Structures are given as C-alpha cells and as structure tokens.
Image: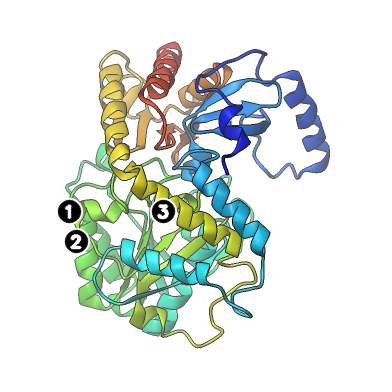
C-alpha cells in the first residue's frame, strides 16, 4: 500500500495566501475558544497533510519544514513504510496493555534498542509514552538500584514538564513558572558552554565535579543526567572531553550516568546517538521523539543489572509501548537503515554549518554557529557584545514563517535559531530553506 499523501503534496515550498490563510485563521478562532491558552501559539497555520519535508496547510500553502515536529519526524512525513506498518497494526489491534496480554512488537523494539544503544553489556528496556516519562522512570530506576536519592543536572537543561522533570529542567519561563513546589533532591551544576565559558572540556568537567563533591557529596548521588547536546537550552555542544570526564567520574563513584538522547538520538547528529561521537557509554539512555516517526513512544534502555533491579510492577503504564507505536518504531528504524539516513545527517550538517558560517562573516548578530549532523543552531547576539539577542530570533522566525519556512527558536535566553530538518530533505529543499533563513538574518541585522 502506498499512502495517498505521497502523490498529493508537492516537493517545493509554495505560498498562495497570506500566512496564516483564511481557513487557518478560522480554525485558530475555534482553537482559542476550545483549547487551553496554556498551549503555545507557535505558527498558527493548520496542517492537513504532509510528505517528506513539505507540510500542506488547509489553505493550500506548502511549507518547508525545518523543525521535524521538534526532531520527531526525522525520516520525513508520511513515509510509505511507516504508513503501511501503522495501518497494518491498527487493523490487527490497537491496544491490549503490554502488562496484561503482551505482543511481539514491544519485544522487538526492546531488542532493537539493546542493539543500537552504546555498550556491549546485557541491556533491557522499558517503553513509555513521552520523553518526560522516560526521564522520570530513568530517575526511579537509578534511585532504586543505587539506594541513593540525589540527582545531578546541568544549567540550560531541558528534561520535561512533569513535576519531577520540571525540577530537572533549568529554564523557568515558560516551563516552571509558578508550578512549584518541585520534587526535591535535584542539584544543578554548570554545563560546558564553549561560546560563553571559554573552558576546555576537562576544565568544565572539573568545575562541575568539584561542585558535586563539595555541595552534594558523591556518595549521595544516584544519577547524573545530561543531554549530550542540549536541545531546548540552545543546541549547546559541550567542549570535547567534557562528557568522557563526567562518565569516568560516575563510573568511579558508582553514580548512574543517564544520557538524555530524546532530541539528539536516532541519527539526528550523524550517529545513532550523540554520545557515540566521543565514545561515551552511558548506564541508561532515554529515547523518544525520533524513535517512532510521529507516534507517541519513549524508552529507557540500559544495563540489565540496573533495569532489572526494579521489583515486578515497579515500571509500567497503560499505554506504554502501544502496539501501533511499536510498529511505527520498527518501520522508522528500518527506514533509517535502508536509506542510510545517519550518513545523510552528516551531509546535511556539513552543508548547514558551511552556509551559516559563511553568513556569520557577513553579519554582526551571529555570535556562534554550532551543532552536529542535522542538529544545527545559530546563537544571536547584540552586535559588538555577548548579550543575547532574543528580539532578533523572534524577527527571524517570523520572517521565515511568512515565507513558508517552519523555523524554531530555542535557548535559555531565547536567542537561538535551531535547525532540525527531516533527514530526507533534498539538497534543493535545504538550499531553499537556507536562502530564506539567510535573508531573514540579514533583515534582522
């Protein structure tokens, strides 16, 4: 079966109405009347179908997607293999609850996770619905397995929106403001941020470790959790050596090293997982987003002795590892392999970094260009200073949106533009998106 969407959406950006168009505006009025205003507005064009890197809205506009639903649709929209797998799964059965009457798809996803995540030790997994759930359960596992309670996290981190994961997250607005009190025993230390701290990886790690040992005590720490490349915090790539030094310290001190690969995993950075770039082997890895191509699925994978330390019934959830979502994950992983999309991510990254570094030479508001693979960002500053330039980021996103390009901002200071194109984006589509972004940056300058 081939999705009908494949033949009904073009391959080029096309704007035929003002954005948002009249039908999107009508839908947005309905949204305002019926949907909580606590959800962000974003770019209020309402999508009716998509294919590859193109989104088509209800007014017939075709938008170029440089966000992938925040790193979710890495294999593209409406992938025929994924559509077929999900359709077949829905036709077979939509739910039984794996904890009641199990099914093979859940087991197969866990087998794939064991094979793909770093480390040649025995691994097991548990599946959940969202990244927040995965992180929360990784913390539960680490605390139970170690008998300790303290959790170490980093400046600029984002780990979710539940009560515990809000406590792990660094940024107050909009994620934490007035939602407390938060879960206790969370301790924050400095992240390696080469653009702003100027430290080597070794020195940044030594600083973090010194704070942990003096203010928390290594013997009290159950887990250290870190995004190998920070996502919402601004695509911060730590200096070389930072992650290996932290990993070595956790091993020495009996602390569980949790790699939050929810945004950076599944080929996004040009390797299956971002920790692979420096040979770091975590004890636990959390995954979601790119795992299932748009279906809600997340996982915790790691050392079998840790994962299996939890008593029977201690992990679970009614929908976790839903059969439709696991079918989507298996199709997504197969597509990543068959189309060699991990290598494609490296090609896309080389193109984006070269274009943006060239642009940086011409404008004064780009302070830093950074990223790995198809996870690339520019950090915007006020010319001649290191001051964050959030207003420029807003202007750039708005310009891109009006030209039919979906662009995302990020960063603790709201001054980062992040690029997360589908790994199936064509060279021509990427060039078009980068041309619009370049014009937006020049306009904001």
Element marked by disc 1: loop
Q: Which of 211 and 161 is in front in this view?
A: 161
**In the rendered structure, are the residues bearing label 1 and label 2 in contact, judged by CB atoms less than 8 Å apart?**
yes
Residue 239 x %, y %? 21, 46
Q: Mark 2 points at which residue?
A: 245
Is residue 313 among what the camera can see? yes
Crowd rating for badge 2 (residues with CA inside 10 Å; few <14, some 14–19, many 20+): some
Residue 205 x %, y %? 22, 57
Q: Is residue 445 left or right of residue 30?
A: left
Residue 263 x %, y %? 43, 49
Q: Residue furthest front?
A: 1
Vertical side of 45 occupied by 183: above or below: below
Q: In this view, does 432 lie to the left or right of 202?
A: right
Vertical side of 302 occupied by 167: above or below: above
State the image quarter where residue 234 is shown: top left
At x 25% / y 41%, what residue is drawn?
A: 194
At x 42% / y 18%, what residue is drawn?
A: 432
Q: In this view, does 81 lie to the left or right of 308?
A: right
At x 40% / y 12%, what residue is drawn?
A: 442
Q: Split into 4 quadrants, where in the image is the C terminus?
A: top left
Q: Split into 4 quadrants, where in the image is the N terminus?
A: top right
Element marked by disc 3: helix
State the image quarter where residue 7 is shown: top right
Q: Name the residue under label 1.
A: 241
Q: Name the residue under label 3.
A: 333
**In the rendered structure, are the residues bearing label 2 and label 3 in contact, judged by CB atoms less than 8 Å apart?**
no
**In the rendered structure, are the residues bearing label 3 and label 1 in contact, judged by CB atoms less than 8 Å apart?**
no
How far is disc 3 from disc 1 in space, using C-alphas? 29 Å
Crowd rating for badge 3 (residues with CA inside 10 Å; few <14, some 14–19, many 20+): many
Q: Which of 45 and 228 is in front in this view?
A: 45
Residue 280 x %, y %? 23, 60
- Which tag is nearer the camera, tag 2 or tag 3? 3
């Amino acid at each position: 079966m081939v999705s009908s969407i494949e033949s009904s959406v073009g391959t080029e950006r096309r704007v035929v109405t003002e954005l948002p168009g009249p039908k999107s505006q009508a839908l947005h009025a309905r949204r305002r009347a019926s949907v909580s205003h606590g959800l962000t507005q974003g770019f209020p064009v309402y999508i009716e179908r998509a294919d590859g890197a193109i989104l088509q809205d209800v007014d017939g506009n075709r938008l170029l997607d440089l966000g992938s639903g925040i790193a979710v649709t890495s294999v593209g929209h409406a992938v025929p293999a994924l559509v077929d797998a999900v359709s077949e799964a829905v036709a077979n059965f939509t739910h039984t609850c794996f904890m009641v009457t199990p099914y093979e798809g859940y087991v197969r996803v866990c087998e794939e996770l064991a094979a793909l995540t770093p480390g040649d030790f025995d691994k097991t997994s548990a599946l959940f619905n969202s990244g927040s759930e995965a992180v929360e359960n990784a913390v539960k596992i680490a605390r139970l397995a170690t008998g300790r309670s303290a959790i170490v996290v980093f400046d600029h981190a984002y780990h979710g929106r539940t009560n515990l994961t809000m406590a792990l997250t660094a940024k107050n607005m909009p994620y934490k403001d007035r939602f407390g009190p938060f879960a206790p025993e969370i301790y924050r230390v400095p992240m390696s941020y080469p653009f702003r701290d100027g430290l080597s990886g070794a020195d940044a790690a030594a600083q973090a470790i010194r704070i942990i040992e003096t203010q928390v005590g290594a013997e009290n720490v159950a887990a250290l959790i870190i995004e190998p490349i920070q996502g919402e915090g601004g695509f911060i790539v730590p200096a070389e050596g930072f992650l290996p030094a932290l990993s070595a310290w956790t091993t020495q001190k009996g602390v569980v090293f949790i790699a939050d690969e929810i945004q950076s995993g599944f080929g996004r950075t040009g390797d299956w997982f971002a920790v692979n770039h420096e040979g770091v082997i975590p004890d636990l890895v959390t995954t979601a987003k790119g795992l299932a191509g748009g279906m809600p699925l997340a996982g915790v994978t790691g050392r079998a002795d840790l994962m299996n330390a939890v008593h029977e019934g201690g992990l679970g959830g009614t929908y976790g590892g839903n059969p439709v979502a696991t079918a989507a994950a298996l199709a997504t992983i197969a597509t990543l392999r068959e189309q060699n999309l991990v290598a494609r991510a490296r090609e896309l990254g080389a193109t984006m970094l070269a274009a943006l570094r060239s642009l940086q030479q011409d404008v004064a508001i780009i302070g830093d260009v950074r990223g790995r693979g198809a996870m690339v960002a520019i950090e915007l500053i006020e010319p001649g200073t290191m001051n964050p330039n959030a207003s420029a980021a807003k202007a750039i996103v708005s310009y891109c949106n009006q030209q039919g390009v979906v662009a995302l901002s990020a960063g603790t200071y709201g001054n980062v533009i992040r690029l997360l194109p589908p790994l199936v984006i064509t060279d021509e589509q990427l060039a078009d998106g980068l041309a619009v972004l370049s014009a937006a940056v020049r306009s904001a300058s």
